[in-house]
Image: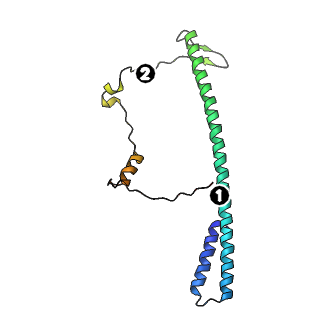
Amino acid sequence: MKLYETYLELEDIWNDVRETEEITDHQLDELENQLQQIEGERDKKALSIACWIKNLKAESEALKGEIANLQKRKSVCDNTQERIKTYLQGCIEPGTKIKDARASIGWRKSERVEYSGDIDDLPDEYVRVKKEINKTSMKEDLKAGEYIECASLKECKNITIK
């Protein structure tokens, strides 16, 4: 029986009880045994799923650590590549082309803007601003009883698995 099936089974039992006009002590004992068995099965399934979640969390944490290690290695490779590229640029006359079967060295023109002033001195058309909701501040104000259009405080129940 799957976890969701236990709820369907419990619902069926309760529907049968509602339809029965009179229940004998024997039927009541049998019903109680059935309910305990199904609830035990439900609890067993729920705990198995909780253990699966814990395993997935542990694997996720291990992967997170491995990703951090790989990102560090990538960063070292990228920085080394840029240093060696800068070294190579300093050793070869700009515009010189060198080529063999393994690699080719060429040059291309590009333009870039360099700005050494204060960003506050620039006109607004040259500055990007990212807008985002400050939910922490909004939550505090809503808790204090302030009205904020289109916003409400919603109470949630979050499962915890340890």
- Is residue 161 rendered to the left or right of residue 134? right
Q: Which mark is residue 112?
A: 2
Secondary structure of the residue carrying tag 2 is loop
Q: Which of 13 and 39 is in front in this view?
A: 39
| Residue positioned most to the front | 144
Q: Position of residue 40 (x, y in %)?
A: 68, 70
Q: Reply above or below: 60 against 23.
A: above
Give the Cα separation between the discs numbered 1 and 2: 54 Å
Q: Which residue is drawn at 65% across and 68% down?
A: 42
State the image quarter where residue 2 is shown: bottom right
CA neighbours of label 2 inside 10 A, class few (<14), some (14 to 19), many (20+): few
Q: In which quarter of the image is the N terminus?
A: bottom right
Residue assigned mark 1: 50
Q: What is the three-letter code of the residue carrying label 2?
A: Arg
Q: What is the three-letter code of the residue carrying label 1?
A: Ala
CA neighbours of label 1 inside 10 A, class few (<14), some (14 to 19), many (20+): some
